[in-house]
Image: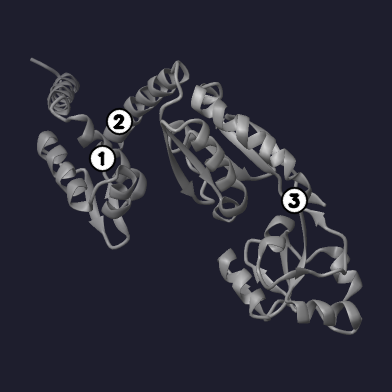
Amino acid sequence: MDTIDQYMQKHVILLIKYAIMHVMDLNWEDYRAVLHLVREKSLGAAAERLGCNYTTIARRIARAENALNQELFEKLPGGYQATELAYKVAEQAEKMEDASNNFLRYAASLEGDISGSITITSPQLLVAYYISPVLKTFSQKHPNVEIKIKATNELLNLNRRDADLAIRITNEPDENLVGQKLTEQRTSIFATEKMASEIENDPDVPLNWIWFEHWDNVPEKALQSRSVPNPKFIFDDMSAVIGAAQAGLGVVRLPLFLGRHTQGLRQVKLIEPQPYVDIWSLSHVDMKDAPKVRAFKDILIPYFKSKRSEFTA
């Protein structure tokens, strides 16, 4: 007769075999739905990542649960809470995703011609004046390539092929990526013409700052040169910061390229430009020599080099 431990061991083995048998019934889309719902914790966010609607995700989750005969998620007020089994399914799905992405990057690196599509991610504020001219030139030279732009400051995952090439403002590029510094940057103080003239002509005019909540402290040299009250306006969005400065609510610290391209603002001649964060071009190591990526960088890098003074001088 089996001991209790032997019985439990056999029972566990049977459960594992049952689970494996039914997991085999899951297709790749079911796996992906579970994976992204584990990551995102909401149907809407998972659907956005997979380019479908939330009802499709819900249907795939239900299909996975039916195949496994177990619930994978608990619906809570804050979102979907994954069960232990859901984490196990997601773990396997992530391995499948990594294998797929590794193969796709390898295949892309072997492409002989420059065609198909390329996905570029860049901060929104760089697109108009510095990325768009590169896109135009690239499109003229390689008309058979569809160019997808993800204009965001988010750190997209290049391992998952969220983008083929990332343009990022950072002093600490991801050590798992390869790339090249496009340019250093400097910042300065900007304000409306009227406010800038008042500050330059009257040493008693204080610097009333408009502030972005993610910035560091006011530049030390500005503190030394002028009375600086605590910021009256603190924003969580850079476009809002710029709009407030254009409305004359105060002075703002901006990267040189941005302040000089912003209508209604001019550089305040009070302190010399201060060091700021660098701009990098980054890609996954498997994609650095892919023909499309290399062709894009062949235009991007010289263009930024030719514009370096707009970022630093």
> Circle 1 is placed at which residue position?
34
Q: Please report whichever mark, 2 or 3, sits nearer to the chain's N-terminal start.
A: 2
Q: Could you say which disc has been placed on residue 235 in the image?
A: none
Kindly identify the amino acid type of the residue bearing the numbered disc 2.
Answer: Ala
Please say if the residues under marks 1 and 2 sit with CB atoms less than 8 Å apart.
Answer: yes
Disc on the earlier residue, 3 or 1: 1
| Discs 3, 1 touching: Cβ within 8 Å | no
Q: Quadrant of the N terminus?
A: top left
Total of numbered circles in the picture? 3
Q: Is label 1 in a helix, a strand or a loop?
A: helix
Q: Which mark is residue 311?
A: 3
73 vs 283: above or below = below
Is residue 189 visible from the viewing direction of this image? yes
Say the numbered circle drawn on residue 93.
Answer: 2
Query: For the residues marked 1 and 2, what is the alpha-carbon distance in whole angstroms?
Result: 8 Å
Q: Residue furthest left?
A: 1
Of callouts 1 and 2, which one flags the residue occurring earlier in the amino acid sequence?
A: 1
Left or right of 56, for residue 288 = right
Residue placed most toward the observer, 5 or 105 = 105
Question: Is residue 284 at all visible to an observer of this figure?
Answer: no
Amino acid bearing label 3: Phe
User: Residue 147: x percent and y percent?
Assistant: 44, 39
Specify the color scheme. one colour
Q: Is residue 100 left or right of residue 175?
A: left
Location of residue 297 in the rendering, given as x and y in whole percent from the top left corner: 60, 31
Badge 3 density bin: few <14, some 14–19, many ≥20, Cα 10 Å: many
Is residue 33 positioned above or below 26 on the image? below
